[in-house]
Amino acid sequence: PPVADIELQLDVTAMLLAGRTRREIGIFAAGEKFATWIFTADENRSIRTLRIPSSQLPTGHDSLPAILIEFRPTVIASAMESHPEVGDIRQLGLALHRIRRIL
């Protein structure tokens, strides 16, 4: 396995539901919960950091680190449920705008 931890910066936004002041998103890597991110109207879109310990990084077939990262919202709903005027029926949770590894 790699000898150093992996640190990622993620530019993310969560859809806030009408009548709710916060949204929780569980962050999982290799099936293990690493963090819970809290989103509010005042702190929604931001760049957040995720550090994955090297001991949790499996090695892929090409000998490069490979890991599944999951973002699990506690509630998933369509935008239309909060804002009927938009007509958007997609189930929304977390928007990932950008991801980069910090070296």
Image (cartoon, helix red, strand yellow):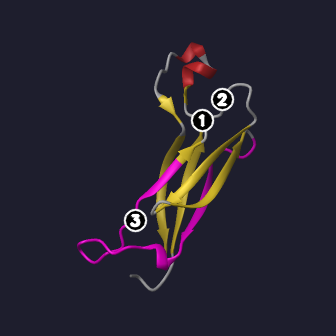
The three-letter code of the residue at mark 3 reads Ile
Q: Residue placed farthest to the top in the image? A: 85
10 Å crowding of disc 1: few (<14), some (14-19), many (20+): few
Q: Are marks 1 and 2 in contact (CB under 8 Å)?
A: yes
10 Å crowding of disc 2: few (<14), some (14-19), many (20+): many
Mark closest to the chain's N terminus, 2 or 3? 2
Badge 1 marks a residue whose secondary structure is loop
Q: Is residue 48 above or below residue 84?
A: below
Residue corresponding to mark 3: 67
Residue corresponding to mark 2: 17
The three-letter code of the residue at mark 1 reads Val
Residue corresponding to mark 1: 75
User: Where does residue 15 sit, x and y in percent of width and height?
Assistant: 60, 35
User: Where does residue 26 sit, x and y in percent of width and height?
Assistant: 59, 51
User: What range is drawn magenta here?
Assistant: 42-71
10 Å crowding of disc 3: few (<14), some (14-19), many (20+): some
Is residue 58 highlighted in magenta?
yes
